[in-house]
């Protein structure tokens, strides 16, 4: 497995080098275009200059498309490395991780997911920002090691067999049976030495975004103001209902959300900023549900009612 890891790292390095070379070609075309546009020519040379500029623009467009493809290849190599990392982790057995480290990793994961960049008039794919996975799921959308929102029984509360005592938690995919439409997932925040795994129907699992949406180019891929969503509450691994106050204005921006909280007069806590990675559409069954979920106590390892 170590040899496979070294190979994939080398493949990624090669893909990055190709991207750098493609970027330099784009920059040289841009420089040539700037020089042509800055020249002051006689009227007889205007047509010749226009033809040369048109050719440069066509070449620049072609090189830009090649640059984009090279970046997407590098991104694919990164995804392969992530999948291999999961295999290595599983081979070493269950992980024991301090909670503070886990919270830091989750925030880093939110920052590191790539921004989707498609071609001209190309629509964003499933799992880009607010765009869900849809009814059909294949291996390109879900893989072992992916993080999802999972609706699981709150085993530590009375009457855990009832639906109202279920909670949306952050979980890691162990496997997905496409024929049975079932997931096997693991709680990412299980107590040390305890592994909590669940077998869940497709309806109780929501895939998280794999790409950030660029609101400028793809406004349809962000939730508008007033949308009811589920979002990961800061310093916890639980999802709660919230309403969008403001949406991102650029790819690196975050949502501003009002989380439901009955302790406030209007039923909502002050707005909190949450990254795109951890904001998903609230399922229809949860919109009128009385489900409150587990208590959101930052820093508390054990999640109870």
Image: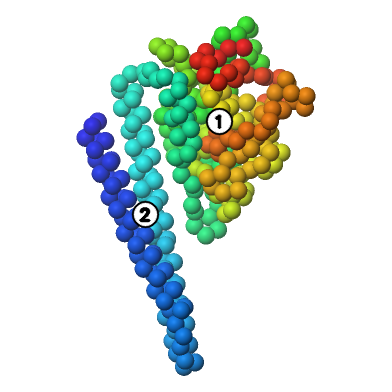
Q: Residue at x 58, y 35 (%)?
A: 274
| Residue 264: mark | none
How many numbered discs, if any?
A: 2
Q: Which residue is mark 1?
A: 206
Is the N terminus in the top left, top right, bottom left or bottom right quadrant?
Answer: top left
Query: Pointer 2: residues within 10 angstroms few (<14), some, or many (20+)?
Result: many
Q: Quadrant of residue 32?
A: bottom left
For label 2, the SS is helix
Q: Nearer the viewer, mark 2 or mark 1?
A: 2
User: Which of the marked residues, 2 or 1, is nearer the chain's N terminus?
Assistant: 2
Spot the residue most to the top: 158
- Image location (x, y in percent) of residue 251: 54, 47
Q: Quadrant of residue 202?
A: top right
Q: Residue 57 vs residue 285: left or right? A: left
Spot the residue most to the left: 3
Q: Residue at x 63, y 43 (%)?
A: 247
Q: Residue at x 33, y 25 (%)?
A: 89
Q: Is residue 51 visible?
A: no
Q: Residue 94 vs residue 238: left or right? A: left
Taking depth in this image into account, of 52 and 184 the one nearest to the observer is 52
Q: Residue at x 52, y 13 (%)?
A: 302
Is the C terminus in the top left, top right, bottom left or bottom right quadrant?
Answer: top right
For label 1, the SS is strand
- Image location (x, y in percent) of residue 167: 60, 19
Say if mark 2 contacts mark 1, CB within 8 Å.
no
Taking depth in this image into account, of 244 and 100 the one nearest to the observer is 100
Instruction: State the separation of the CA atoms marked 2 and 1.
Output: 30 Å
Q: Residue 128 vs residue 101: left or right? A: right
Query: Pointer 1: residues within 10 angstroms few (<14), some, or many (20+)?
Result: many
| Residue 70: mark | 2
- Image location (x, y in percent) of residue 36: 43, 79
């Amino acid at each position: 497995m170590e040899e496979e890891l070294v190979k994939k790292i080398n493949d990624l390095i090669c893909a990055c080098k190709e991207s750098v070379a493609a970027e330099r070609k784009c920059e040289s075309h841009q420089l040539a275009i700037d020089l042509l546009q800055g020249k002051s020519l006689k009227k007889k040379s205007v047509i010749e200059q226009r033809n040369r500029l048109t050719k440069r623009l066509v070449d620049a467009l072609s090189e830009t498309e090649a640059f984009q493809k090279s970046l997407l290849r590098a991104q694919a190599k990164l995804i392969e490395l992530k999948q291999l990392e999961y295999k290595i982790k599983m081979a070493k057995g269950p992980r024991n991780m301090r909670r503070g480290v886990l919270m830091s990793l989750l925030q880093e994961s939110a920052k590191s997911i790539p921004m989707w960049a498609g071609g001209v008039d190309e629509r964003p794919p499933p799992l880009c920002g607010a765009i869900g996975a849809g009814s059909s799921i294949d291996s390109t959308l879900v893989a072992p090691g992916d993080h999802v929102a999972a609706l699981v029984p709150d085993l530590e509360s009375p009457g855990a067999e009832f639906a109202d005592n279920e909670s949306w938690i952050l979980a890691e995919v162990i496997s997905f049976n496409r024929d049975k439409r079932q997931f096997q997932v693991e709680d990412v925040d299980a107590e040390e030495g305890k592994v909590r795994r669940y077998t869940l129907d497709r309806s109780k699992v929501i895939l998280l975004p794999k790409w950030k949406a660029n609101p400028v180019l793809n406004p349809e891929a962000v939730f508008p103001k007033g949308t009811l969503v589920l979002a990961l509450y800061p310093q916890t691994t639980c999802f709660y209902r919230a309403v969008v106050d403001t949406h991102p204005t650029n790819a690196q921006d975050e949502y501003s959300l009002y989380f439901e909280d009955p302790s406030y007069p209007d039923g909502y806590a002050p707005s909190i900023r949450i990254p795109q990675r951890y904001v998903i559409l609230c399922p229809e069954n949860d919109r009128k549900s009385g489900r409150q979920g587990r208590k959101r106590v930052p820093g508390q390892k054990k999640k109870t009612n």
